[in-house]
């Protein structure tokens, strides 16, 4: 897939797939395939694997490569597949990006380097080198959780690189999303990276949203996106605010532990989380189940 092709396809709802694991904390490719089938059957427009809430910091390089291969096999070309190849070292990010290409991914999602005292010129150099070596289109991952956050102006500069197709703009400030579209939106696709801002992002002209909560409520996110596209704004607004207790759960219990518990509850068991996260106990799971019922996610 060319950079232009991926740019055009970076719209709608992209599920930030968690990484299923067995009870012994090994990767579970069968559960991953089942989950991906569920996302696609529920209308997801794309799948992203290996991101922050997919626990990539606790995976070995070999496990990350195995994850890419399993995901590409499961997606099988039905929707775009983007593999997160983020690493603080440029060589490691390049090695992982090559593995994603061999696996059959359509693009790679890459963060800035997050080593101590990284400077703006270091970040630019990191992306320049990845751009020069690129075998797949690059989807910049502007994470709010790694300690290095790109400004809209910095994203606009990176957007000029030939192989950059888009950015997952993880800013939780709607003004930052708007400024990113204003400065870079003609060059790349600017996807909303925080599903708490999905409605404001769509209303501001962003083409879609990446979401971790969409793991267990894919159809809900797709419905909101479709309602907005069809001008059914009142229905989209009602749906968005109905989800607030679920957003509160994520803050109360943390991701990915809350998401894996929710997947268990809806019938897509995806195993425990690795340290430093902790798998949730019965009291938390009961709270999550009750909230999913009260918000209409499950009957």
Image (cartoon, rainbow, N blue to C red):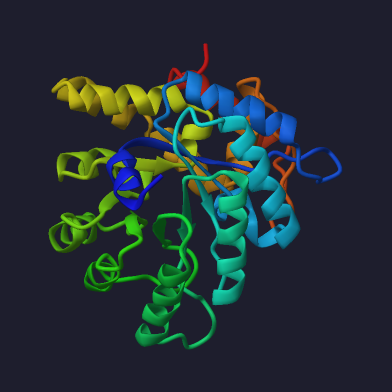
Name the residue: 60% across, 21% down. 266
- Which of the pair 252/169 is nearer the observer? 169
Instruction: Work out whether 11 lies above or below 286.
Output: below
Q: Quadrant of residue 231?
A: top left
Q: Is residue 204 left or right of residue 262?
A: left
Compared with residue 227, is residue 172 higher up or lower down, i.e. above or below?
A: below
Q: How many marks?
A: 0
Q: Which residue is located at x 44 percent, y 38 percent?
A: 80
Who's the residue at 47% across and 63% down the image?
Answer: 145
Above or below: residue 293 compared with residue 138: above
Residue furthest to the top: 299
Residue 192 percent location from the top left of the image: 31, 48
Rendered position, 187 above or below 245: below
Name the quadrant containing residue 296. Answer: top left
Residue 207's x, y, as percent?
24, 41
Q: Which residue sits at x=65%, y=62%?
A: 57
Q: Position of residue 212 (x, y in %)?
A: 49, 41
Query: Of all residues shown, which one is farthest toward the right?
Result: 24
Q: Is residue 252 visible?
A: yes
Which of the two residues, 292 or 50, is positioned nearer the viewer here?
A: 50
Of the 4 image quadrants, the one containing the N terminus is: top left
Q: Is residue 287 visible?
A: no
């Amino acid at each position: 897939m060319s950079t232009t092709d991926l740019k055009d396809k970076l719209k709608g709802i992209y599920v930030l797939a968690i990484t299923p694991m067995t009870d012994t904390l090994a990767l579970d490719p069968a559960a991953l395939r089942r989950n991906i089938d569920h996302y696609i059957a529920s209308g997801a427009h794309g799948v992203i694997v290996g991101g922050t809430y997919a626990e990539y910091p606790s995976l070995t390089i070999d496990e990350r490569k195995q994850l890419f291969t399993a995901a590409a096999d499961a997606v099988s070309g039905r929707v775009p597949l983007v593999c997160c190849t983020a690493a603080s070292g440029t060589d490691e990010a390049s090695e992982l990006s090559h593995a994603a290409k061999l696996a059959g991914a359509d693009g790679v999602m890459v963060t800035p380097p997050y080593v101590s005292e990284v400077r703006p010129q270091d970040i630019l150099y990191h992306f320049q080198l990845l751009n020069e070596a690129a075998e797949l289109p690059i989807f910049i991952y502007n994470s709010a959780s790694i300690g290095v956050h790109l400004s809209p102006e910095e994203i606009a500069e990176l957007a000029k690189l030939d192989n950059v197709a888009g950015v997952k703009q993880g800013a939780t400030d709607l003004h930052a999303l708007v400024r990113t579209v204003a400065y870079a939106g003609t060059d790349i696709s600017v996807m909303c990276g925080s599903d708490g801002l999905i409605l404001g992002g769509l209303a501001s002209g962003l083409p879609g949203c990446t979401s971790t909560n969409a793991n267990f409520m894919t159809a809900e996110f797709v419905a909101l996106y479709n309602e907005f596209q069809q001008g059914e704004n009142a229905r989209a607004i009602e749906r968005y605010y109905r989800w607030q207790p679920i957003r509160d759960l994520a803050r109360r219990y943390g991701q990915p532990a809350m998401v894996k518990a929710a997947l268990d509850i809806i019938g897509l068991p995806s195993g425990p989380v690795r340290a430093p996260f902790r798998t949730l106990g019965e009291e938390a799971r009961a709270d999550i189940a009750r909230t999913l019922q009260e918000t209409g996610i499950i009957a």
